[in-house]
Image: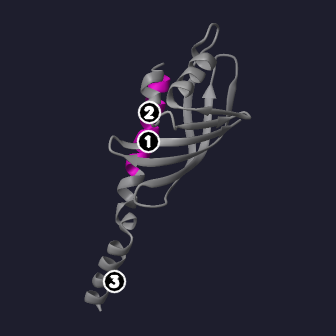
Amino acid sequence: MAKCLTAFTCLLLFLDPALGQAPTAKAAIQKVLDDQVVAWNKGDLEGFMAGYWKSPELSFFSGGTKTAGWQATIDRYRKKYQGEGKEMGKLAFKEISIEVIGADHALVKGRWHLTLSKESIGGLFTLLMKKLPEGWRIVHDHTSN
């Protein structure tokens, strides 16, 4: 019986390699998110953006606006959080759900919360992440508040 279960498990991993990668992938994805929070809370926007795919094909949807590309996305963040009279505040991600949907893709859902000096704001996010040669990166971000 034990040999049958072992053979069955090996067959499943052979047919769907993502099954064996799920815990490792989830941990790697969680680290990307954790690193983003640390960078944001240090005021390091470049470090925060390291979690995104540095490509003109990156897509970012928020507040009825579509932003295309890594450069346009960081420019949007700079204008909104580092412009004159703006602040980055303290970021937290909560209620994170990571679903590995293949050997190199994952769907991440959660809540974001930003504590500013005069108010707190927050909302929901859905991320499509892809495993690239440089590691797991956000290739699409849909954020609402």
Per the image, the residue denoted by label 2 is: 54
Per the image, the residue denoted by label 1 is: 137
Label 3 with label 2: CB-CB less than 8 Å: no
Work out which quarter of the rendered image holds the N terminus and state it. bottom left
Q: Residue at x 60, y 23 (%)?
A: 76
Looking at the picture, which amino acid does disc 1 mark? Answer: Arg
Q: Secondary structure at mark 1?
A: strand
Q: CA distance from mark 3 to mark 2?
A: 40 Å
The numbered dot on residue 31 is none
Circle nearer the N terminus (1, 2): 2
Q: Is residue 19 above or below residue 110?
A: below
Q: Which percent across, then down, holds residue 54? A: 44, 33
Q: Is residue 101 above or below residue 45?
A: below
How many residues crowd mark 2 within 10 Å: few (<14), some (14–19), many (20+)?
some
How many residues crowd mark 1 within 10 Å: few (<14), some (14–19), many (20+)?
many
Q: Over which residues does the magenta segment extend?
A: 27-41
- In the picture as drawn, the residue positioned furthest to the front comes out as 56
Circle nearer the N terminus (3, 2): 3
Q: CA distance from mark 3 to mark 1?
A: 32 Å
Asked if the stretch drawn in magenta spans residue 44, the answer is no
Q: Is residue 123 above or below residue 25?
A: above
Q: Residue at x 55, y 29 (%)?
A: 91
Q: Residue at x 39, y 67 (%)?
A: 19
Left of 115 or right of it: where is 17? Answer: left
Q: Which percent across, then down, holds residue 68? A: 58, 33
Q: Is residue 89 visible?
A: no
Circle nearer the N terminus (3, 1): 3
Per the image, the residue denoted by label 3 is: 8
Work out which quarter of the rendered image holds the C terminus and state it. top right
